[in-house]
Image (cartoon, rainbow, N blue to C red):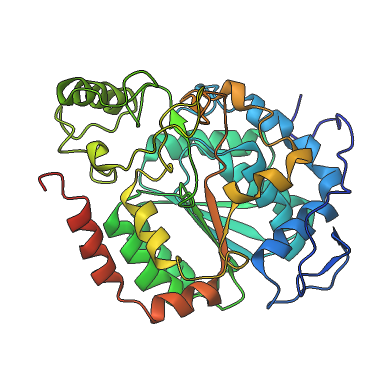
């Protein structure tokens, strides 16, 4: 079935969430027709956008059905079903003129954005990637979807290309690139301060502190019966996981790829009850822990981890395609779980935190904390 093929049904939109003052909720129900407000909490904007455009979301389901078709999407990546629905709905709601995305990869998440722009009848997404092979695959896919008028491809290092795009004005910044300290520090200090305050910012592969998740064959490398694996066995499992995911900078896990934290330094949470397994909070990238520290003092309504909203958005079937997850992410009971590891905020809120924090000092503290030789 085509991307814009027949609808498969109508989603229920009468969701309920505890009423909170000042959020635009009325008796626990969100009114989809509330007028745009740049001071509206990001959390509220997400809920309102999903309600308003819920009737269009089902047609997107053919995307995750093809997510692991390596002929179409040759690069390994993960953008979850609920995350795609939220991205689409927010673009439909806010009608951005210009979206800047780094990086393109095979164009999977790009497609959600382009479809929303096409439905809006205006706007373009400028997508940047240094991987020419992946971007060529994305070009072919975008062309096959009839979305060439919505997407502008830029090949090269985003640190050279994005500054020029920022000067033209950006309404939505979509970040999903190299997850290193260097990259995160660059866009926090060189890109975010130049955005208009009402622009939206999306950062992928970031989870809240309270998350408790697992990856099959990956961190934590512990089973319920052996909470204290031998150091040799844990290192061996680390090597296997790094190699399987194309992340091994060397065959020794104490020297991981530059975006991965040393796996043996990740905090492991022991089972809270029988039948559960050890977990981590899902943040095993350098960028993730840096972003987490920067936004720690921000309001959860302004800095929205999509993972936190899973209990409130069950009607949008966030785990509908979890069984297809090739990297086999699970919860503490080994049940398939799409993490929906995205952070959404407005540029102004992020700018306020960045302006009052010493990003380099935070980075240095984290580098010391995760020093593999310490």
Q: Position of residue 285 (x, y in %)?
A: 34, 46
Q: Position of residue 103 (x, y in %)?
A: 44, 49
Left or right of 373: which side holds 11?
Answer: right
Quadrant of the frame with the N terminus: top right
Residue reaching furthest to the left: 373
On screen, residue 93 above or below 207: below
Left or right of 341: which side holds 149?
Answer: right
Q: Nearer the viewer, residue 169 or 318?
A: 318
Image point (88%, 41%), residue name:
12
Q: Nearer the viewer, residue 106 or 239?
A: 239
On screen, residue 339 above or below 189: above
The tally of labels here is 0
Image point (23%, 31%), residue name:
248
Does any portion of residue 204 appear in the rendered image?
yes
Residue 132 lies in what quarter of the image? top left
Q: Position of residue 365 (x, y in %)?
A: 22, 63
On screen, residue 51 above or below 326: below
Image point (72%, 63%), residue name:
45
Does any portion of residue 149 appear in the rendered image?
no
On screen, residue 192 above or below 52: below
Q: Position of residue 23 (x, y in %)?
A: 76, 70
């Amino acid at each position: 079935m085509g991307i814009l093929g027949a609808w498969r049904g109508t989603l229920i939109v009468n969701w309920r969430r505890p009423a909170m003052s000042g959020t635009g909720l009325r008796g626990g129900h969100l009114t989809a027709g509330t007028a745009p407000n740049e001071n509206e909490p990001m959390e509220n904007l997400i809920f309102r956008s999903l309600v308003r455009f819920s009737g269009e979301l089902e047609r997107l389901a053919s995307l995750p059905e093809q997510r692991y078709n390596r002929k179409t999407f040759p690069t390994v990546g993960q953008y979850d079903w609920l995350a795609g629905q939220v991205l689409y709905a927010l673009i439909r709601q806010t009608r951005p003129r210009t979206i800047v995305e780094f990086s393109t990869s095979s164009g999977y998440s790009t497609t959600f954005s382009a479809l929303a722009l096409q439905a809006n009848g205006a706007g373009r997404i400028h997508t940047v990637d240094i991987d020419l092979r992946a971007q060529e695959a994305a070009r072919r896919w975008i062309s096959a979807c009839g979305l060439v008028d919505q997407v502008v491809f830029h090949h090269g290092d985003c640190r050279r290309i994005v500054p020029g795009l920022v000067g033209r004005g950006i309404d939505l910044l979509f970040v999903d690139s190299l997850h290193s300290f260097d990259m995160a520090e660059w866009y926090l200090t060189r890109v975010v301060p130049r955005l208009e305050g009402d622009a939206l910012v999306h950062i992928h592969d970031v989870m809240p502190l309270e998350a408790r998740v697992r990856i099959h064959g990956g961190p934590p490398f512990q089973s319920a019966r052996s909470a204290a694996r031998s150091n040799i066995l844990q290192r061996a499992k680390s090597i296997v996981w790094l190699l399987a995911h194309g992340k091994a900078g060397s065959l020794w896990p104490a020297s991981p790829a530059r975006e991965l934290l040393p796996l043996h330094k990740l905090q492991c949470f022991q089972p809270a009850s029988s039948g559960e397994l050890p977990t981590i909070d899902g943040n095993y990238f350098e960028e993730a822990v840096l972003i987490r520290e920067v936004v720690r003092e921000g309001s959860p309504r302004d800095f929205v981890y999509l993972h936190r909203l899973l209990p409130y958005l069950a009607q949008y079937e966030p785990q509908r395609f979890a069984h297809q997850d090739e990297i086999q992410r699970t919860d503490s009971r080994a049940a398939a779980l799409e993490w929906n590891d995205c952070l959404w905020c407005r540029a102004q809120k992020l700018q306020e935190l960045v302006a009052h924090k010493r990003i380099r000092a935070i980075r240095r503290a984290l580098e010391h904390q995760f020093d593999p030789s310490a």
